[in-house]
Amino acid sequence: MDTLIITLVIAGLMLFWWNSAGAYETAIKAAKTRCFQHGLTLLDDTLQMKKLRLCRHSSGYVQFCRRYDFEFISDGEFRYQGKVYLAGQQIEKLELQPYREDPMV
């Protein structure tokens, strides 16, 4: 019985890791795309997960909701903040802090 419990816990952790890796890839792709569309530079090509919680999908099942933060620059002088919100593997919202346009563009 103990072996079954340990196996289920390990399987659950592996499933969570796999799900988290997919969510991260979705979020970074969305951040890169948005930055490219606006002529911005995503700093370090990384996101930091700031929030993880359980939420209910519109169909009724429970899923993980995550918030990733990132930094970008527009004019090479100031850093600005961006946020990507995911529900499961779907982008719910992507926010960019108001930024100054690069006068050289």
Image (cartoon, rainbow, N blue to C red):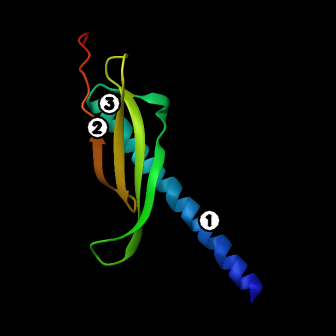
Query: Which residue corresponds to the image point at 46% horizontal and 41% vertical from the top-left?
Result: 47
Q: Quadrant of residue 95?
A: top left
Q: Residues within 10 Å of mark 1 (few under 14, many from 20)?
A: few
Question: Label 1: which residue?
Answer: 14
Q: Position of residue 103 (x, y in %)?
A: 23, 12
Amino acid at dot 1: Met
Residue on which disc 3 sits: 36
Quarter location, residue 94: top left
- Residue under label 2, please give it: 96
Q: Is residue 97 above or below residue 17?
A: above
Type of residue at label 3?
A: Phe
Per the image, label 1 sits on a secondary structure element best described as: helix
Q: Is residue 32 left or right of residue 46?
A: left
Amino acid type, label 2: Leu
Mark toward the start of the polypeptide (2 vs 1): 1
Q: Is residue 21 left or right of residue 90?
A: right
